Image (cartoon, rainbow, N blue to C red):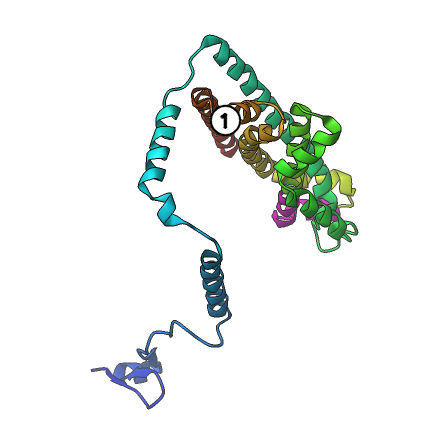
Amino acid sequence: MIKPTREPGLPERVSGPTCESAGQTITRPALGRPPPIWNLHCTACWLTLGLVILVLSSFASLDLQWRKFLSGDALASMGRFIQELTQPQADLAFLRKIFWASLETLAMSAVGTALAALAGLALALPAAKTHPDDPARWRDLTRLLLNALRSVPELVWAALLLISAGLGPLAGTLALALHTTGVLGRLFAESFENQPQGPAEALRLRGVRPAQVFWYADLPQALPQLVSYTLYRWENNIRAAAILGVVGAGGLGQMLAFHMGLFQMMETSSVLIATMILVALVDGLSYLTRLGLQR
């Protein structure tokens, strides 16, 4: 019969004739209390407390008039507004305008994303440290540039570019390209740094030049992830392109701002429906493309 024994302050030990004959000791951890929820030496606890205080302070500092928002008059006005939006304009001439504006929005997002993918790839190379012996002299400076590009929203870029490019899709396309370059450049650089370095290291040990290592090892490994990032940003840019029209950058957004400004809810409803259909189509196309890359 094996009998558990425990000395004060030590875990239980099970010993007996069988254990002694085999020269073994079975040790089981003693059951203790669960760790406390709060620990003065826990960094994560203090960070969580700080975030909670920040969120509560944000609610307290904002003048959120929930009573006015949920009042009877506000709900009645919202109901009338939604009722007007459920009656879209179906005039053939207006639908033709929406069709061409949708194509313009699609073209803005596609061209802006393509330019950003090329520029992001060019900037990702000096921004990435692909192996321990890589000097990466321009890494910090390039990453600072990428941070600056993506820190400015597309709407602000469009407002700035309207001064030089004027009203129309050019300003919107360039605004999408500049912001997306900062995003894709950082994502591409992280992909190059985090991918397995076995194939590239094997080529470097054989004396292959860095350019050839990139073309035959680094790029083929990272290409599926780069394409996936690019398609994802294209989905985002479709939505952003629809908003950029608010500042006169063309496309569906420009029609939306115009008709909303005149309180033409039927036309506004048609533009919103066209925007949702366009976003859904691009999302589906992007999903099917990513699915094909995974096979």
99 over 161 or under it: above or below: above
> Relative to residue 215, is residue 41 drawn left or right?
left
* Image-quadrant location for residue 180: top right
189 over 56 or under it: above or below: above
Q: Which residues are magenta?
A: 186-205
Residue 8 x %, y %: 33, 90
Instruction: Give the main secondary structure of the magenta stretch.
Output: helix
> Relative to residue 232, is residue 90 drawn left or right?
left
Residue 129 x %, y %: 71, 51
Residue carrying label 1: 260
- The answer to whether any part of residue 117 appears in the image is no
Q: Residue at x 41, y 73 (%)?
A: 38
* Image-quadrant location for residue 255: top right
230 over 46 or under it: above or below: above
Q: Secondary structure at mark 1?
A: helix
Kindly give the residue lying farthest to the front in the view shown.
Answer: 73
Q: Residue at x 71, y 25 (%)?
A: 166
> Relative to residue 108, is residue 264 drawn left or right?
left
| Amino acid carrying mark 1 in the image | Met
Residue 249 x %, y %: 63, 27
Q: Residue at x 68, y 30 (%)?
A: 174
Residue 263 x %, y %: 47, 25
> Is residue 9 on the magenta stretch?
no
Exactly how many numbered labels are in the figure?
Answer: 1
Q: Foreground: 75 or 117?
A: 75
* Image-quadrant location for residue 248: top right
> Is residue 194 on the magenta stretch?
yes
